Amino acid sequence: MADALVEAALRARENAHAPYSKFKVGAAIEDRAGVIHTGCNVENATYGLTLCAERVAVFKAISEGVRKFTRVAVVADTESLTPPCGACRQILWEFCGDVEIVLVNLAGKSETLRLGSLFPRPFDDSFL
Ligand code: THU
Protein backbone atom coordinates (compact mmCIF):
# COMPACT_ATOMS: atom_id res chain seq x y z
CA MET A 1 0.00 0.00 0.00
CA ALA A 2 1.32 3.45 -0.84
CA ASP A 3 2.33 5.45 2.21
CA ALA A 4 1.45 9.14 1.74
CA LEU A 5 4.19 10.17 4.17
CA VAL A 6 6.87 8.30 2.21
CA GLU A 7 5.52 9.65 -1.10
CA ALA A 8 5.73 13.18 0.31
CA ALA A 9 9.34 12.64 1.42
CA LEU A 10 10.22 11.26 -2.02
CA ARG A 11 8.74 14.33 -3.70
CA ALA A 12 10.46 16.70 -1.25
CA ARG A 13 13.80 15.03 -2.02
CA GLU A 14 13.48 16.27 -5.59
CA ASN A 15 13.71 19.84 -4.26
CA ALA A 16 16.99 19.23 -2.44
CA HIS A 17 19.63 21.89 -2.99
CA ALA A 18 22.70 19.66 -2.80
CA PRO A 19 25.17 20.88 -5.45
CA TYR A 20 28.18 20.22 -3.18
CA SER A 21 27.54 16.76 -1.79
CA LYS A 22 25.13 15.64 -4.56
CA PHE A 23 23.44 13.75 -1.70
CA LYS A 24 19.74 14.50 -1.89
CA VAL A 25 17.53 13.82 1.13
CA GLY A 26 13.79 14.20 1.59
CA ALA A 27 11.89 14.18 4.86
CA ALA A 28 8.24 14.27 5.80
CA ILE A 29 6.66 14.59 9.21
CA GLU A 30 3.02 13.95 10.03
CA ASP A 31 1.33 15.97 12.72
CA ARG A 32 -1.37 14.78 15.09
CA ALA A 33 -4.06 16.24 12.84
CA GLY A 34 -2.77 14.13 9.93
CA VAL A 35 -1.18 17.05 8.06
CA ILE A 36 2.15 16.28 6.36
CA HIS A 37 5.05 18.74 6.48
CA THR A 38 8.02 18.20 4.17
CA GLY A 39 11.66 19.20 3.95
CA CYS A 40 14.74 18.69 1.82
CA ASN A 41 18.39 19.36 2.54
CA VAL A 42 19.53 22.87 1.69
CA GLU A 43 23.28 23.25 1.23
CA ASN A 44 25.34 26.42 1.08
CA ALA A 45 28.65 27.45 -0.50
CA THR A 46 30.02 27.91 3.01
CA TYR A 47 29.20 24.21 3.67
CA GLY A 48 28.71 24.76 7.41
CA LEU A 49 25.35 26.45 6.97
CA THR A 50 23.82 23.35 5.41
CA LEU A 51 20.46 22.29 6.81
CA CYS A 52 19.33 18.67 6.77
CA ALA A 53 15.97 17.66 5.32
CA GLU A 54 14.65 16.54 8.71
CA ARG A 55 15.32 19.86 10.42
CA VAL A 56 13.81 21.80 7.52
CA ALA A 57 10.63 19.73 7.82
CA VAL A 58 10.43 20.13 11.61
CA PHE A 59 11.16 23.86 11.58
CA LYS A 60 8.64 24.50 8.81
CA ALA A 61 5.97 22.77 10.88
CA ILE A 62 6.98 24.49 14.12
CA SER A 63 6.87 27.86 12.40
CA GLU A 64 3.29 27.08 11.35
CA GLY A 65 2.36 26.56 14.99
CA VAL A 66 2.31 22.75 14.94
CA ARG A 67 3.71 21.01 18.03
CA LYS A 68 2.63 17.35 18.08
CA PHE A 69 3.92 14.78 15.61
CA THR A 70 3.23 11.11 15.07
CA ARG A 71 5.55 9.89 12.32
CA VAL A 72 8.66 10.84 10.33
CA ALA A 73 9.90 9.55 6.95
CA VAL A 74 13.42 10.00 5.59
CA VAL A 75 14.34 9.16 1.98
CA ALA A 76 17.81 8.98 0.43
CA ASP A 77 19.39 7.09 -2.45
CA THR A 78 21.54 4.71 -0.40
CA GLU A 79 21.58 0.91 -0.26
CA SER A 80 22.13 1.05 3.51
CA LEU A 81 19.18 3.15 4.70
CA THR A 82 20.10 6.71 5.72
CA PRO A 83 19.24 7.59 9.34
CA PRO A 84 18.91 11.14 10.71
CA CYS A 85 22.26 12.70 11.72
CA GLY A 86 23.03 13.39 15.37
CA ALA A 87 21.90 17.00 15.25
CA CYS A 88 18.59 16.01 13.68
CA ARG A 89 18.06 13.30 16.30
CA GLN A 90 18.32 15.95 19.01
CA ILE A 91 15.90 18.27 17.22
CA LEU A 92 13.45 15.45 16.48
CA TRP A 93 13.56 14.42 20.15
CA GLU A 94 12.75 17.96 21.25
CA PHE A 95 9.54 18.06 19.27
CA CYS A 96 8.60 14.43 18.63
CA GLY A 97 9.97 12.38 21.53
CA ASP A 98 10.14 8.67 20.83
CA VAL A 99 8.46 9.03 17.44
CA GLU A 100 8.16 6.36 14.73
CA ILE A 101 10.64 6.89 11.88
CA VAL A 102 10.44 5.25 8.46
CA LEU A 103 13.71 5.07 6.53
CA VAL A 104 13.34 4.47 2.79
CA ASN A 105 15.58 4.30 -0.26
CA LEU A 106 14.75 4.81 -3.92
CA ALA A 107 14.61 1.05 -4.53
CA GLY A 108 11.69 0.83 -2.11
CA LYS A 109 13.64 -0.76 0.74
CA SER A 110 12.32 0.47 4.07
CA GLU A 111 12.69 0.04 7.80
CA THR A 112 10.51 1.40 10.58
CA LEU A 113 12.05 2.14 13.96
CA ARG A 114 11.62 4.52 16.85
CA LEU A 115 13.79 7.54 17.59
CA GLY A 116 14.59 6.14 21.04
CA SER A 117 16.49 3.26 19.46
CA LEU A 118 18.69 5.72 17.53
CA PHE A 119 18.98 8.20 20.40
CA PRO A 120 18.81 6.21 23.64
CA ARG A 121 19.94 8.76 26.23
CA PRO A 122 18.74 12.16 25.13
CA PHE A 123 19.25 15.45 26.86
CA ASP A 124 15.87 17.12 27.09
CA ASP A 125 13.71 19.35 29.25
CA SER A 126 13.39 16.65 31.92
CA PHE A 127 16.85 17.77 33.14
CA LEU A 128 15.99 21.46 33.34
N1 THU B 1 21.63 15.07 5.17
C1 THU B 1 20.29 15.20 5.44
O1 THU B 1 19.63 16.09 4.90
N2 THU B 1 19.74 14.33 6.31
C2 THU B 1 20.37 13.25 6.85
O2 THU B 1 19.75 12.50 7.58
C3 THU B 1 21.79 13.01 6.53
C4 THU B 1 22.48 14.10 5.82
C5 THU B 1 22.22 15.97 4.17
C6 THU B 1 23.12 17.04 4.69
C7 THU B 1 23.98 17.31 3.47
O3 THU B 1 23.31 18.22 2.62
C8 THU B 1 24.05 15.97 2.76
O4 THU B 1 22.98 15.20 3.26
C9 THU B 1 25.35 15.21 2.97
O5 THU B 1 25.67 15.12 4.30
Image: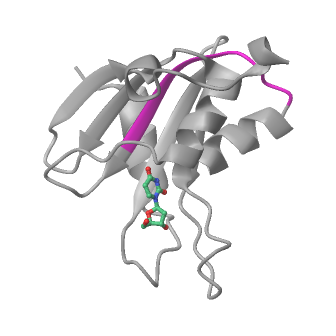
Quarter occupied by the N terminus = top left
Q: Is residue 8 left or right of residue 81?
A: right
Of 3 and 77, the residue lying toward us: 77
Task: Based on the picture, tell me whether residue 73 belongs to the magenta stretch.
Answer: yes
Is residue 35 among what the camera can see? no
Of 124 and 74, the residue lying toward us: 124
Q: Is residue 53 left or right of residue 106?
A: right
At horizontal 60% and vertical 31% (from top left) the residue drawn is 92
Q: Is residue 81 left or right of residue 37?
A: left
Dominant secondary structure of the residues highlighted in magenta in the image:
strand
Q: Is residue 123 above or below residue 20?
A: above
Q: Is residue 119 left or right of residue 94?
A: left
Task: Based on the picture, tell me whether residue 99 belongs to the magenta stretch.
Answer: no
Q: Quadrant of ligand 1?
A: bottom left
At horizontal 51% and vertical 64% (from top left) the residue drawn is 15
Quarter occupied by the C terminus = top right
Residue numbers of the magenta segment: 65-74
Is residue 56 among what the camera can see? yes
